[in-house]
Amino acid sequence: MSEADIRAVLRDELARLAPEIDFEALDPAVDIREQADLDSMDFLNLVTALHQRLGVDIPDADAASLATLDGAVAYLARKAGAPPSS
Amino acid sequence: MAEFLMPSLGADMEAGTLVEWLVKPGALVKRGDIVAVVETQKGAIEIEVFEEGVVERFLVEPGATVPVGTPLAVIRGEAEPAGEEAAPSPAIAAEPAAPEPVAPEPVSPAPEPPPAPSAATPEHVRISPAARRLAAERDVDLAKVSGTGPGGAIQLADIESLAAPTPASRPAPFDFTQMRAAIAAAMSRSKREIPHYYLWETVELRAASAWVAHANAEQPPDKRLLLGALFVKATAVAARAYPEFNGFFEDGSFRQSAAVHVGLAIALRGGGLAAPAIHDTADLDLDTLMARMRDLVGRVRAGRFRSSEVADPTITVSSLGERGVEALFGVIYPPQVAIVGFGKVVERPWVVDGAIGPRPVATVTLAADHRVSDGHRGALFLAEIGRLLQHPEAL
């Protein structure tokens, strides 16, 4: 599972929750919830989907680490044992 | 012999358009089965049947718009012999002059997902496991299915809709113009007819937040709770103790409801909202309630309501979650008589035992119908919600 794979999963799952957003236009350092207008239920569903698709444990206390794209990729890559990107 | 009628899905609904039958004549149906889809101002709504028996025949064909109360089909009790009743009345067919009953232009805010290059060949179809299972069961040729999931992936719903007994395609989930008109009508009526009064109270939520965090700590994400589930449960339990906030004002008088069906206000992407009911909210444990809320939000945003959910909320809860503002003062959805609003949870200085410390707090509001209740009782109702939230373990 590379960082590119993780990014693709994130793109897929965000498209499911917020079909109208342009993934490429998201600022990777800004809270996804603000940019994609996700409510608490959406965000929980995002965490649920990432957990199920990537097989990564995401304790509730860590969920805030996934609030930005950069944060989510870094967190998930670390937990999934992805090789660092070049 | 029973007739299955065009249901009333709210006080403001006069007629509905039958979009499709989801059963065939001869099908055995039981209470709660979804048998048809009806298009209303609120969107396409799945209609449940309340009789048990065999679908004898249809009286209305897809495409026809008929008033509330019009018989749509005849349902024969299992014990009754077939075809015993009087001469069949001709089925109400769609207006012959009407244009082809094709699905209306999609007005969904959802743009088409980009097609997956691999979706073209059946060997590399992207498909969810559940969809694959159902497709195999129903002998569906996957090469002919266009998926609506991310990247063109085939989802369960794609197979379900394909394999539905009638070939009619479902309309887009929402016609936002219609929905806006329905909201406008209901809210104008509310502000015209209902003398609202408003109360608010700041509720300290340290115990509730800590309890949720603790409950979630060992749970996988699909079993986790949101504070919103506690808000809904506390409101439902309080509404049982204060029944003048739970029921309907119709024909000049208030009729309280024995059951508490909390209508959950759900914002739709692209605008509009719906507040369908979670049945018997006060009787559900928090895990079940949370599962129902997730299911309901998911279905509503996908445009799949059920008739019973739309028709009978007895009180509404509007909860803004983590984002949004600190307080909202709701407009009562007629013929209901109260709406409870929860602002976002914020950290604020709070005085406990003479010392100031940071605490998570939320502003809880009540808008209630002054024809039915007064501020004094409203204050007690709101205080009861706040009190219940201090003991999350008991919810």
Image (cartoon, coloured by chain):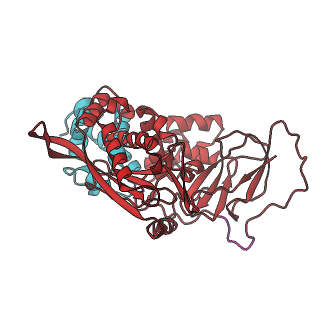
Horizontal relation, residue B378 to residue B21: left or right:
left
* View extreme (bottom): residue: B97
Horizontal relation, residue B220 to residue B96: left or right:
left
- Overall secondary structure of the magenta stretch? loop
Horizontal relation, residue B24 to residue B262: left or right:
right
- Per the rendering, the colour in which chain B appears is red
* View extreme (left): residue: B355
The C terminus of chain B sits in image quarter: top left
> Is B97 inside the magenta-drawn segment?
yes
Horizontal relation, residue B255 to residue B18: left or right:
left
**Taking the image as drawn, is residue A42 in sight?**
no
Expressed as whole percent of the image width and height from the top left, the position of residue A62 reads 23, 34
**Taking the image as drawn, is residue B205 in sight?**
yes
Q: Nearer the viewer, residue A52 or B224?
A: B224
Q: Nearer the viewer, residue B252 or A8?
A: B252
Check the image and report above or below for B83 versus B175. above
Q: Which residues are magenta?
A: B95-101
Tell me the quarter of the picture where residue A27 sits. Answer: bottom left
Q: Nearer the viewer, residue A47 or B274?
A: B274
Expressed as whole percent of the image width and height from the top left, the position of residue B94 reads 73, 66
Check the image and report above or below for B258 versus B271. above
Task: State how many labels appear.
Answer: 0
- Per the rendering, the colour in which chain A appears is cyan
* View extreme (top): residue: B218
Residue located 68% across and 44% down the image: B50
> Is B211 inside the magenta-drawn segment?
no
Q: Nearer the viewer, residue B300 or A83?
A: B300
Expressed as whole percent of the image width and height from the top left, the position of residue B330 reads 37, 59
Expressed as whole percent of the image width and height from the top left, the position of residue B20 reads 67, 55
